[in-house]
Image (cartoon, coloured by chain):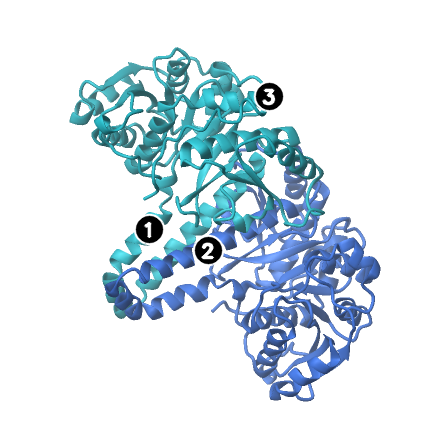
Chain colours: A cyan, B blue
Amino acid sequence: MMARRSQNGADRATSRPVTVSVDAMGGDAGPAPIVAGMAWSAQKNPDIRFLVFGNGAQLEKLVDKRKALAGRCEVRHADGVVTMDSKPSHAMRHGKGTSMWEAIDAVRAGDAQVCVSCGNTGALMAMSMVRLRKIPGINRPAIACLWPSRNPGGFNVMLDAGADIRADAEDLLQYALMGSSYARVGLGLERPRIGLLNVGTEEHKGRAELKLAHDMIEAASQHAPFDFIGYVEGGDLPSDRVDVIVTDGFTGNVALKTGEGTAKLIRELLKQAFNYSPLSRIAALLAVTSLQRLRKRIDPRRVNGGVFLGLNGLVIKSHGSADATGVSAAIKLAFELGQVDFPARVAARVASLSAPVQGAETDSGQVYGTPK
Amino acid sequence: MMARRSQNGADRATSRPVTVSVDAMGGDAGPAPIVAGMAWSAQKNPDIRFLVFGNGAQLEKLVDKRKALAGRCEVRHADGVVTMDSKPSHAMRHGKGTSMWEAIDAVRAGDAQVCVSCGNTGALMAMSMVRLRKIPGINRPAIACLWPSRNPGGFNVMLDAGADIRADAEDLLQYALMGSSYARVGLGLERPRIGLLNVGTEEHKGRAELKLAHDMIEAASQHAPFDFIGYVEGGDLPSDRVDVIVTDGFTGNVALKTGEGTAKLIRELLKQAFNYSPLSRIAALLAVTSLQRLRKRIDPRRVNGGVFLGLNGLVIKSHGSADATGVSAAIKLAFELGQVDFPARVAARVASLSAPVQGAETDSGQVYGTPK
């Protein structure tokens, strides 16, 4: 994640309070790590407020224990819980009254600027679409995620990470526009470089809808504040030749989980390698800060937070297994995007497709400052 | 890669000489690393012979320098070279006389049991299909690759890694059958566990053709020597709950390159972390054997070799950038599979679909021995 210019409200001209609505019941380990993550964020950021939804008695108890949350967190009781194995369509039809539903509705009602949930991704997206509605002109919303990379800021953006398993050429063009807005606002890049994920960089390879999307994004880039670099491959996801990687939600989800799975395997093997012999255990002791430096760089908790793009309201999906560090990272992202009314910027960018020149600078606001 | 029971021909009841035809001109660095890899393999394995295709004068010079190749390697001159940016369709129509074409034709003519090339994947597959033809009953051939995993043998199999960007349910079923044969012969697994790659493990998720393929593979598994474990996700590629992961060539190629790209990024970051300070450089010195142990485990050169499944003849694609170690790994794989007439086993397995019970044991031969 990037460093903001300063954590001190007085130094930040643009700073304004942001209320985050939190679905506290969706995570794998219940509400405790979620409230811990909230407290952590509150401690670091005086401009943040919370509305937290779930079992009232349980939440009051957890919140009362956290000094940092005193006077800055309102508990709202919600009876139901959307489980990890709920069908999205069922959750959408019968989800009213669940903590997830109510957390989303707080954004709809204007009580909060952004919603964070660790729950079932499919259900969260289905409910968000029903309650917040899609931005005019958007066919399929997308989930954008951060990807550790060789770029100076340390991250690339990939979308769709799994909102919808289908995407036609028109959808991929919209992902390019929305992803470029996210990279401008979220990563502070003036002209993000957009790449379209394919199996080869030669133009004759790939599926028909990709060829069409290639030409549409190229045409749109003539009047938009991004550069289209054409096709990229799986190996380019962490590269420094691209900032935003556009793909359908099936491929994006497989890529995301493959990357996470590979990193996890290597972490385990690294641990085994250093546990192999007494000498290697001594080496590990000496190498401990080097290894911690590496671990921090590829820690999946630091890139926690899938941003739902294309809705009239901001929803962020946190990993179901996120601990306090992970939840806090998702809340930080929520705060940054909540400060600048991000959905309005995306809407302006998408609308600019029909009036490209006038709309060219609509999303130029930058949230993050210099990369650390 | 697995250890064979013994490298000594006398100890191995099943050992018989294998001639490998090598396209020496396709690699990124020309024929030198390829001939070096051949020499390395020849040195370790007395049962291996080579037919090598490319620029005759250049190859004679390189081969003459290698004692291990004396009397065991025939150079055959071929004028043309298929370049990395050749269109597969063009290479297929105009490729006659290239080193790639002639190397494949040596398998067709029975002069060699298996062909290895570092060249353009698309062209190699297109030419292989034209010259060797598909096995009766196979609609789309596939490329199977090894994937570092937590399984005792150290590897899983994934297919299709990029032979064809499309795959319908019938194709995915055939991939399951061919992948199971490969795992039985190549990894020595009696009942490989097959998984179908999807975005979620719940049965209501995913594309329509995946649901159909799920049911077809499940039905086929009733009479076949493999277990179908249902859907798996990207994070399961390195897991020990599955042996063979089935997917279309687009998704498989993105996953493969994403995994490789992630591993490469982590290797770079690890290096940076240990170069950070004088103390961390000392730590690196002490940790050198631990780190080498890790490097060896995830070294992409050791898993080099995409096996083309579904053709009347064996072709193995080596990485374009493979060095002598990588080429030698691909040749080792070629030798192992060449020993058992692998294409005939796959053909029998595919034919068994119409007569499942009789065909159930056709591919039970094991090439690799105990995992090291």
Tell which tag, 3 or 2, sits nearer the viewer. 3
**x then y, percent, for residue B206:** 59, 34
Q: Secondary structure at mark 2?
A: helix
Question: Which amino acid lies under the numbered mark 1 shown in the image of this protein?
Answer: Arg
Task: Tell me the SS state at disc 1.
Answer: helix
Nearer to us in this view, B200 or A109: A109
Residue under numbered circle 1: A295
Q: Residue at x 47, y 14 (%)?
A: A131
Q: Which residue is mark 3?
A: A355
The front one of A309 and B302 is A309
x and y, in percent, of residue B116 in the image: 68, 68
**Residue A229: mark:** none
Kindly identify which residue carries mark 2: B263
* Frontmost residue, B19 versus A300: A300
Q: Dot 2: within a 10 Å radius of its alpha carbon, few (fewer than 14), some, or many (20 or more) residues?
A: many
Disc 2 and disc 1 on one polypeptide chain: no
Three-letter amino acid code at the position of disc 3 = Ala
Q: Nearer the viewer, residue A2 or A97?
A: A2
Q: Chain of mark 2?
A: B
Mark 3 and mark 1 lie on one chain; the one further toward the N terminus is: 1
- Residue under disc 3 on the same chain as residue under disc 2: no
Residue at figure coordinates x 28%, y 25% from the top left = A13
Circle 3 Cα neighbour tier, 10 Å, few/some/many (<14 / 14–19 / ≥20): few
